[in-house]
Amino acid sequence: MGVARVERVGGTGAGDGAPGTGGGVPGTGGDVPGTGGAGAGAAGGAGELRWGTAEEAGLSGRELEGMAADVRGFLGPSPVHPWCAGAVLLAGRGGTVALHRAMGWAVRWAAYDGATDTAVGLPPELRVPMTPDTVFDVASLTKLFTALLAVRQVERGTLELDRRAAAYLPEFGRAGKAGITVRHLLAHTSGLRAELPLYGAPDREGRLRMLWEEAPEDPPGSVYRYSDLNMIALHLLLERITGHGLETLLHDEITAPLGMHRTRFVPPLSWRAETAATEDARRPWARLDRGMVRGEVHDENAYAMGGVAGHAGIFSRARDLAVLARTLLNGGAYGSTRVLSPASVDLLLTDVNAAFPGHAHGLGFELDQRWYMGALSGPRTAGHTGFTGTSLVLDPEADAFLVLLANSVHPVRTWRSGSAPRAAAADRLARAIPVRPPAGTGPTAWFSGMTAPGGATLALPATGPDAARLDCLLWWDTVPATDPLVLEAAADGAEWRPVPFRTAPLGGPGEERDHPDGTAAGWSGRRWHRLTAALPPAPAPSGRPHLRLRFRYATAGRLVGRGAYVTGLRVLDGAGRTLFDETRPRDAARVAPAGWHRSAD
C-alpha cells in the first residue's frame, strides 16, 4: 500500500515540459503541474508530496523564479567555461514541491579535447535536452543512503555505533585500524586518508587487500577528514552483518518502500536514454580511459567495484530525492510507510563533531555548511554534495528542501570550479521563506538585504539629550565571524560607537542574551527577539547635543546569511516617555535607510 501511494505522488512525468532541441542553450523545461489528481501528485496521506504553487508552499514565487534564473546563468561562462551543461532544480516546503525545473542539456558534448581545452559539440539533432525526470549519477549523495541503511541496522540492534568496526568486519582491523568505531566511519573521524586507488587493483581481492592493509594517518577520533574509505568500509560491514548486497539493501529497505523507482545502483540499459552524461573520462584528467560516460558510474573506484559502493554509485532523479527529503523532514515516515524512527533521524541530523569546528556532521549527513547550503545554513541544516554536480539540502527549521542535480563534469571535470550555483540556489530558497513581522507591529519590517558589501545603515532621526532607551524587535541570521549587525550611537559631531544591548526571544522558551559589543551575528534561531538598549548619556554642558542611532549591517564575502530585520522602533526617555515611535507616521517618515528597505516577507 505504501509503495503504491508513493508512486502516485511521484507520477510518471506525463505533462512535464521538455526543452526544445534547437541550437544554443535550450528552454527551461516545464514545472511539474499541480492541478490535482493522482497524475499531478495529489497527496493522499500525511506527509506526502504534491506538486503545487509557491503560494501553496508558503514561498515567494518571485524568489523561486530568481533561483531558476540564477542556476540557468551557470550554463554559460562561469567564468570561462559553463559550470554545467544542464541541471534539474527542485525546491519545496512542507508537503508542496513549488519548483521543479529542467534546463540545458543532459547530453551536450561528444568529447573533450585536452590539447586545446575545448569540447567537441554534438550536432543539434543528437543533443539530449534535460527534462525534470532526467536520471543522474548522484556520486557522493550515495553516502547518505549508506548512512540510512546503517542506522536501520542500529534500530534493529544488529549494529552498535560505538562498537569497533572490526568486531563486525575483522579484516578491517588490520594495520592499526582496530580502534575505529562505526561512529567514526559515519562522522569521517576514522583517521583514514581521503581515498585509495582501488581501481588500480586487478581484482576484488586486490582491492579489499588494499583496504585491509591501509593504516590510519591519524588516531581515530583525533581529526576530521572526509574519506570515501569510511563509507566503503561501512558498505562491506553492512553486507557482512546482513548477508545481502548493498544494492539489495537499498532496494528492499529504502527505495521500494518509498516508491523511489528511479533510484538504484547499476541502472539497466533501458534507463540510458533518460540519463545525463558525465565525463569524457580519459587520462590524464581522469584515472581510467573510458570515453564519454553515460549510464555507468563516473567514480573510478565505484566503477572498479562493479558500480556498487558505499561512497558512490547510486543513480537517481530529483523527484525521488524529494521523497527522501520529505521522509527525513517527516521524522522517518512518508505517508503510511516508515523507514526510520524519529530518534534515528535525529542521529542522522545531530552534530557529532563538536570537537571539530567547521566540520559539523551528523551520521552521514553534513550540517551547517554554508559553502553550498548558502543562507539556508543553520545548526540543523543537513545535506550533501556529489562530485558530478549534485546536492541535497534539508532545512528542518523551515521544513524546506532543495535538490540541485547538474552534470557539471560534462564534458570534463576541470571545467567547473566551486559550488556557486548550489549556494546561489540555497540563498534564493532562504529568501523565499517569509519572515513575517510580529502581530501588532505593522505589515512590514525593515530588511537589511542579504548582501551589503559596503555596509547598509538604518538611521533614526536625532533625538534630544533625554533619550535613555531603545526598544525594538530584531531578527537576524548572518555569517558568524564576518557579517555583523551593529547598533551604534553618536552625539552631534562625534564618531559612531557601538551600543551594548540585550535580546530576548519572543513567543516561546529561549535564553536572553547580552551583546556587550553592540553586535548580533550568527544563528538566532530564526526567531524574533525583543531588543533593549540603555543609551549612552549625552556629553555634558552646553549645546544640549542630539543623539543619533543607527543599525549597520555589512557583509564580507560571497557567502552570506539571511540578513537582519528590525521593526517596532521606539526611543524613550528616563521616565519612560516616548520620544520616537516608528508606528507614528510622522516619525516613520524620518527614518533614513541606506541599503535597507521595507519588506512584508
Image (tube, rainbow, N blue to C red):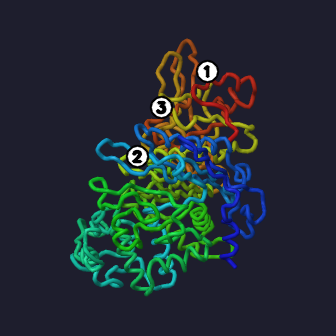
As shown in the figure, which amino acid type bears the numbered disc 3?
A: Pro
- Quadrant where the N terminus sits is bottom right
Q: Secondary structure at mark 2?
A: strand
Pointers 2 and 3 in contact (C-beta within 8 Å): no
As shown in the figure, which amino acid type bears the numbered disc 2?
A: Val
Q: Is residue 445 above or below residue 249?
A: above
Please give the residue where the numbered disc 1 appears in the rendered image.
462
Q: Residue at x 61, y 77 (%)?
A: 257
- Earlier sequence position, callout 3 versus callout 1: 3
Please give the residue where the numbered disc 3 appears in the rendered image.
453
The crowd level at tag 1 (other Cα within 10 Å; few <14, some 14-19, many 20+) is some
Q: Residue at x 25, y 74 (%)?
A: 202
Q: Secondary structure at mark 1?
A: loop
How far is disc 1 from disc 2 in space, using C-alphas? 65 Å
As shown in the figure, which amino acid type bears the numbered disc 1?
A: Ala
Asked if one can make out residue 309 in the rendered structure from this viewpoint, the answer is no
Please give the residue where the numbered disc 2 appears in the rendered image.
120
How far is disc 2 from disc 3 in space, using C-alphas? 40 Å
* Residue 125 image offset from top left, x and y in percent: 54, 49
Pointers 3 and 1 in contact (C-beta within 8 Å): no
Left or right: 456, with 172 as reference point: right
How far is disc 3 from disc 1 in space, using C-alphas? 26 Å
Pointers 1 and 2 in contact (C-beta within 8 Å): no
- Quadrant where the C terminus sits is top right
Q: Is residue 584 above or below residue 352?
A: above
